[in-house]
Image (cartoon, rainbow, N blue to C red):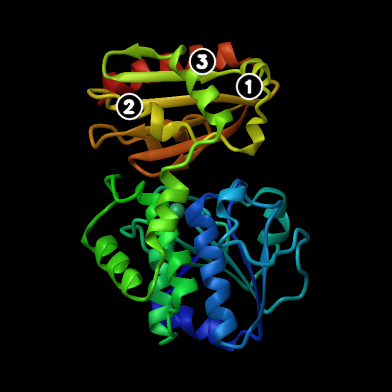
Amino acid sequence: MLNLTINQLKKKIKTARNVAVFCHSRPDADALASMFGMIEILKKLNKKCVAVLEETPKKKYDFMTGEFQTEFPENYDLYISVDVAGKNMLGKFEQDFLNQSNSIEIDHHHNRDSSATYTYLEDNASSCAEIIFKIAKHFKIKIDKHLSTILYTGLAGDTGCFLHENTNSQSHNIASELIDSGADIFFVNRRLFKSNTKNKLKLIEIALSKFDYFKDTLIVDISYEEFKSIGYNPNDGVDLIDFVSSVEGIKLTALLTERTPNNCSISFRSSNKYDVSILANRFGGGGHKGASGCKDIKGNINDIKKKLQKEIKNFIKEN
Ligand SMILES: [Mn+2]
């Protein structure tokens, strides 16, 4: 892993004739914004480029999802990953991506493990989309309405609409520039933060009955059976975490979900009191101080919940 300066990064992109772009599996707003933002930049630089995804992203992101392929593209000059904090976040492309020597990871996670030959890291950026914005500026690319809407979505997504603690003056300044370039912020914010499906409301009803408090922490667990009881496919995405982590006085929230039988994920949120990326690490995951997670935890959800309760008790004693 070699760290690049922005000029070295620019040069590598400039000299490549064709570029393949990857993001993490089950992509969120920032991953897709960074990926399709990068694609827009590459197109404007007249590069042959391709976005690579495991599957079609969530419907709510369809306004920024451009063309993509689901097979690993061979023989490209350059392979770029965006918003990928660890090897296993590359999903089914992990091994093929690792086999490339001409690879660059562009990321903003501070607690991470490298999966590319070259790294361009800005761990003070609220979102990877902020970095993509800077790259566009360095290339002196005109940030049009579409690109500004995409990049704004990444910023709004990772900052929770400028509410999380990764929000700073830089994110507001960049958002301001994006608004001036035509970003459709009302559309984006309504789409991301103000719409609930009927199914999600049923899920909230279940979640509310499962709140398990301990001191200033909260665990909410939802089993595969519970998902099934309301006809909900958990693989369509479970973005409940912002809701369950909104309880006054609670400094650490863990949402444990069993997406397929005996295979669980945990999302963590915290106020500045706790660094939940450390806790996520203990379950094989990672992320940020205030928001992190882990997936593919094998076993019975009740056993995993017991382990989680124990880990959280120990963790808050250490802090
Ligand atoms: Mn991100």
Disc 3 and disc 1: Cα gap in Å?
A: 17 Å
Q: Residue at x 53, y 54 (%)?
A: 84
How packed mark 2 is, by other alpha carbons closer than 10 Å (few <14, some 14-19, many 20 or more), is: many
Q: Residue at x 43, y 84 (%)?
A: 142
Q: The C terminus is located in which quarter? A: top left
* Amino acid type, callout 1: Phe
How packed mark 3 is, by other alpha carbons closer than 10 Å (few <14, some 14-19, many 20 or more), is: many
* Amino acid type, callout 3: Lys
Disc 3 and disc 2: Cα gap in Å?
A: 15 Å
Q: Residue at x 64, y 38 (%)?
A: 236
Element on which disc 3 rests = helix
Circle number at residue 252: 2
**Foreground of the two, 57 or 213:** 57
Q: Residue at x 51, y 15 (%)?
A: 305
Mark 3 or 2 closer to N-term? 2
Q: x and y percent of residue 144 in the render?
A: 45, 79
Q: x and y percent of residue 123 in the render?
A: 35, 58
Instruction: Name the residue tied to disc 3.
Output: 305
Q: Residue 15 lies in what quarter of the image?
A: bottom right
Element on which disc 1 rests = helix
Circle number at residue 121: none
**Image marks 3 and 2: residues in contact by CB distance under 8 Å:** no
Instruction: Name the residue tied to disc 1.
Output: 227
Residue 109 appears in the rendering: no
Element on which disc 2 rests = strand
**Image marks 3 and 1: residues in contact by CB distance under 8 Å:** no
**Foreground of the two, 17 or 191:** 191
* Amino acid type, callout 2: Leu
